[in-house]
Image (cartoon, rainbow, N blue to C red):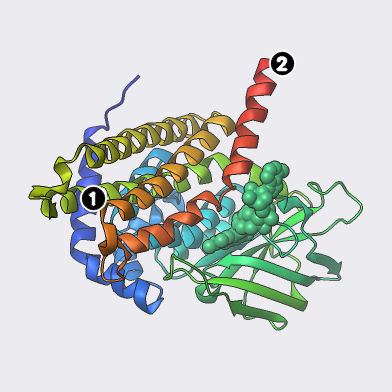
Amino acid sequence: MDFDLNEEQRATREALRAFLTKECPIEYVRECDEKEVYPFELYKKLAEQGWLGIPIAEEYGGTGGSCLDLVLFLEEFARHFEAGANIYYTSIVIAADAIGHFGTEDQKKTLLPKLARGELRFAFSLSEPGSGSDAASLRTKAVREGDEWVINGQKMFCSSAQVADYILLMARTDSEAPKHKGITMFLLDPKTPGVEIRRLKKLGLKPMDLNEIFLTDVRIPADCVIGEVNHGWTNVLKTLDYERCCLSAVNVGAAQSVLEKCLTYTNEREQFGQKIGSFQLTRAKLADMEMEIDASRLLTYRSATLVDKGIQNNKESAIGNLASSETYVRAALNGMRIMGGWGYLMEYDMQRHYRDSKLAEIGGGTSEILRIVISREMQKAHG
Ligand SMILES: Cc1cc2nc3c(=O)[nH]c(=O)nc-3n(C[C@H](O)[C@H](O)[C@H](O)COP(=O)(O)OP(=O)(O)OC[C@H]3O[C@@H](n4cnc5c(N)ncnc54)[C@H](O)[C@@H]3O)c2cc1C
């Protein structure tokens, strides 16, 4: 068992760190948050440097990174700019993964190189007003009519749809089949007549827009399907471990950023004639953060390594996701405690982590659902 990164991985992380320090300073992060704007300029620069191509195979214009490579990238990106890393995940990773695994040769050749060059952005739309954790009970319907699919329904909670060139949209194509079996993944151009996207106001991750989508007699060509008709749920399940690793990596990087801010603050702020970092209760908070982040990091790397070996690891990826999300939320809460009243001020960064962290316990499965996944796998293994 090797807990060390190899030389190439370390060098890549150093190069990324230097790039982000220059191109993504904290002032830029604050501005994107305050103005609630998508970081277009940063994405252009990431594309120019080839960073967008990590989850895309070399033959389609990417750099063909492993799951661990992607995890290392997202961890470092989130350490600088958590919302940016989340956007990378929703706009690039989900689509690269789905199209790379299930797309036709034509779809791969047409879409993936553009994705790697930053010329296309995607969004993923599974959730609906009536189906969240029970996502497979979705009701948006797609009916085949000649050479077209006609889609009707309503989607909820679609990240980055305002800026997306395509939406990977999940819809029911067989109402008679059991709920997991009659779902198809579609490639939807949001400019298609009948598509209406409305932005939702939310607590955090302000640079990443969140939307509801209304679909009224939306007609798309018959070949706008990713994977097999009625097998869309398989697309989702097969890529779940990989995607949970990515979300965990974002949590670890963001939590690390909280810890670093706490270390700086506790070293500067004085009360009762001492640095607050000298109080044992403050030190205990810092030690707990370090311990939990370190454990989450190792759990995430373990899961990514299993993905790279082609081993399905529902339990391990869910453990990594659960540990890292709750670690991040706790770190942000303790960060607020450590900063006293100053943390409550918008001019400090801790309030952003406090707001942003909550999604970690919702997206990719709520904490309750992740506990269900873990316990189910444990019981299965126990017989
Ligand atoms: C900022 C943001 C971005 C998002 N982006 C996307 C996106 O891009 N694409 C997309 O498709 N979706 C997206 N989502 C939706 C997200 O995946 C769902 O919110 C999530 O799956 C939970 O669904 P829900 O909100 O409907 O909660 P519900 O499923 O209604 O859950 C409510 C509560 O009940 C609990 N619960 C549910 N079932 C069980 C059970 N069996 N046992 C115990 N407890 C249970 C949950 O844990 C939760 O505490 C996003 C959500 C947010 C907030």
Q: How far across and how far down the image is residue 347, in percent?
A: 26, 71
Disc 1 marks a residue whose amino acid type is: Cys
Q: Which residue is mark 2?
A: 383
Location of residue 105 by image quarter = bottom right
Q: CA distance from mark 1 to mark 2?
A: 45 Å
Tag 2, which secondary structure? loop
Assess whether mark 2 and mark 1 are in contact (beta carbons under 8 angstroms): no
Mark 1, other Cα within 10 Å: few <14 / some 14–19 / many ≥20:
many
Q: Nearer the viewer, mark 1 or mark 2?
A: 1
Q: How far across and how far down the image is residue 29, in percent?
A: 30, 68
Mark 2, other Cα within 10 Å: few <14 / some 14–19 / many ≥20:
few
Q: Which image quarter is the C terminus in?
A: top right
Q: In percent of the image, x 31 and y 59: which residue is there?
A: 350
Q: Which residue is mark 1?
A: 262
Placement of 72 over or under 186, stated as above or below: above
Q: How far across and how far down the image is residue 316, in percent?
A: 52, 31
Left or right of 246 on screen, residue 220: right
Disc 2 marks a residue whose amino acid type is: Gly
Task: Give the farthest residue toward the right.
Answer: 176
Task: Give the farthest residue toward the left.
Answer: 273
Ligand 1 lies in quarter? bottom right
Task: Give the farthest residue toward the front.
Answer: 272
> Which of the two discs, 1 and 2, labels the residue nearer the N terminus?
1
Q: In percent of the image, x 16 and y 48: which residue is there?
A: 276
Location of residue 249 by image quarter = top left
Q: In percent of the image, x 7 and y 50: which residue is there?
A: 273
